[in-house]
Image (cartoon, grey):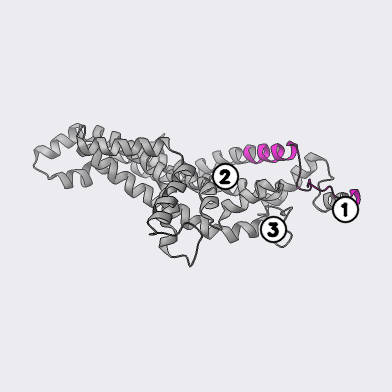
Amino acid sequence: MLRFAFHRLLTAIPVVLVAVTACFFILRLAPGGPFDMERALPPAILDNLRAHYNLDQPLFSQYLSYIFGLLQGDLGPSFTTDDFTVSEQILIGLPYTLILGGGAFLLAVLVGLAAGIFGALFQNKAPDYVIAGLIMIGLVVPNFLVAPILQLVFGLQLGWLPLGGWGDGSPRYLVLPMAVLAFPHAARISRLMRGSMIEVLNSNFIRTAKAKGIGLRRTVLGHALRPALTPVVSYLGPAAGYLLTGSIVVEEIFGIPGIGRYFIQAALNRDYGMVLGTVVFYMLLIVVLNLLVDLAYAFLDPKVRTR
């Protein structure tokens, strides 16, 4: 297992390097810059700012300096916030993003698995059709459209939940953003789980278990659940990444002070350092999550380790 994990980690290093390189040069070569304002700065001040952030150096020298700092764990300075570096701003917003993304991930997995199993057990019946309809809504309607609808219904009209913000961090402030973030992924997990569970329930060893008189609950939980989870687990890595990166829009809509809000503000202010640092952080997080999913997949299917 350790050899398998080490091999997967080595294969991720070139991917990370290529992605960091592409993001760096795309940001640098894009029109505009962090010091382009409605009122132009005096040339002397602009030259001093560019020298302070090493923007007066050749582009390749800037790239090598950034890679060298990245290897030391330094994501570089923020071009618009002198009081905090990029790493410090990410650490400030990270707890909010992890709570929101982690809660939405657990909600999506629990709801998706339950709905998928329920749909498989009632295949081509009324409950299955209802779940299929909800799945289509979750797959088609984007979260930036679902969010204001839920705010309008449960926040303004019914007054059950706050419209946004973090407040005192109580769960009532997280219900709406977590639901918006988890809904499309719960639909995808449900769809995968339903198809996989139907296939497993029609396999020979399940027919043998039923012939021995084992109850439905024990058959599903004890025999069918583990092999049916295999395609779902392969989706959980990208899903976790999508939940964390998708929280950028949700955090902005609900006013949650996570990494996503820093990213939006940095993009609007053309803050090269913050935008690139956020992208690198999310990318490394996705690589780690995919590695964990590969290990879980190898645990569920030992043949993966031999391949």
Distance from the alpha carbon under mark 2 to that under mark 1: 35 Å
Residue 233 in view = yes
Residue at 82 percent of width and 54 percent of height: 52
Circle 2 or circle 1, nearest the eye:
1
- Which disc number belongs to residue 85? 3
- Provide residue 59's location: percent of width, then percent of height: 79, 40
- Which disc number belongs to residue 227? none
- Identify the residue position indicated by label 2 in the image: 283
Disc 1, SS: helix
210 vs 83, nearest the viewer: 83
Q: Would residue 62 be found to the left or right of residue 75 on screen?
A: right
Ranked by sequence position, the earlier of labels 3 and 2 is 3
Residue 301 in view = no
Label 1 amino acid? Answer: Ile
User: Tags 2 and 1 in contact by the CB under 8 Å rule?
Assistant: no
Circle 3 or circle 2, nearest the eye:
3
- Identify the residue position indicated by label 1 in the image: 45
Residues rendered magenta in the picture: 19-45
